Amino acid sequence: SMLSRFIGCTLILAQPVFAEETEDPIAKASEEKTTGNSTNAWGGSLSLGYDSNFFQASDYRSSRALSFHGSLHFRFWESYSLYANSGGYQTLQGAEGFYSTDTVVGLSKSSLLTFGESGNVSISGQLSIPTSQSSQDNFLNTAFRVQTPISFKLADIGITVAPRIRKNFHQYTTSPNGNVNISWALGLLLAANYTYGDAFFSASALGGTSINYNGRWADGYSYGGSLTTGYNLRDDLSLSLTLASSGVYTDAAQGTLGSFDIFDEAKATYSLGLTYSF
């Protein structure tokens, strides 16, 4: 549904303390610097957000929701962490109700190797538990994703380049509506963040493609982007505002000139979030 897509876009790209279906090691590293909790073995966050698209409340395309998210992590040895998170959202329009997102558990190594003065390569692997209605409707048993973030600093701006690959495991190769399910998903996350006192700013872009169970590549490349600004009210409490959008780019080699809209009003969302870190 349109609602689940815009909530998903917000969760994947927008929130400063988590990304995609899980607490993201990239974002978590930034959060630790902000909260000063990097020496604690246990930690996590609780987030509450108001998510909306840009259509008027009287428009049938309008979507409004309250989203909830919780994450936990446990550090052991020198640079390893176990993490888990889940969440959901309460729709405020249309078919009102509470919907869960998928739950994720994973393992990360924060420093695989270093380079230069600030360069670092990390790695994470995670399993998805299909607690969302969408995953259950498509008979997803689980999914496994590997990501290798490469991070460094340019002046005072933190830069991250993170290639990722995900393998889905469905009970059936086709969904109930007859479409062939996605077997493999390939993506690349680009992110930049900057802090000034208690204020923080970030931008991210996520692009990718997929292969279905018949071995067919997607006709185009999906992409999304977000801009976030926020303020640390306290060491453990922050407020953020995020603008996000997504779309599909069709390759010119397939007979078109391609289309890349930086801002698509029909798919754009904004989110006001409050995050408590511990």
Image (tube, rainbow, N blue to C red):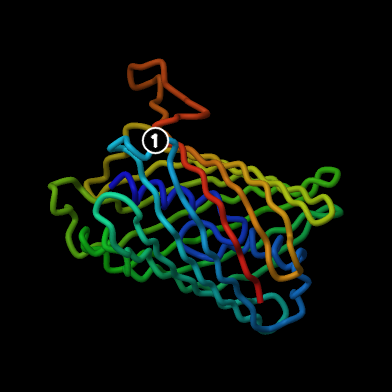
Residue 156: x and y, percent? 84, 47
Residue 238: x and y, percent? 68, 61
When asked about the image quadrant of residue 236, the answer is bottom right
Residue at 56% over, 47% down: 189
When asked about the image quadrant of residue 31, the answer is bottom right
- Please, is residue 11 above or below residue 253 in the view? below
Residue at 47% over, 42% down: 269
What is the secondary structure assignment of the residue under circle 1?
A: loop
Left or right side of 60 for 72: right
Residue 261: x and y, percent? 48, 26
Report the front residue among 120 and 244.
Answer: 244
Report the front residue among 153 and 20.
Answer: 20
Identify residue type, mark 1: Gln
Label count reads 1
- Please, is residue 112 above or below residue 260 in the view? below
Report the front residue among 33 and 161.
Answer: 33
Write down the residue under mark 1.
56
* Label 1: few (<14), some (14–19) or many (≥20) C-alpha neighbours in 10 Å: few
Residue at 78% over, 71% down: 36
- Please, is residue 252 above or below residue 51 in the view? above
Report the front residue among 112 and 32.
Answer: 32
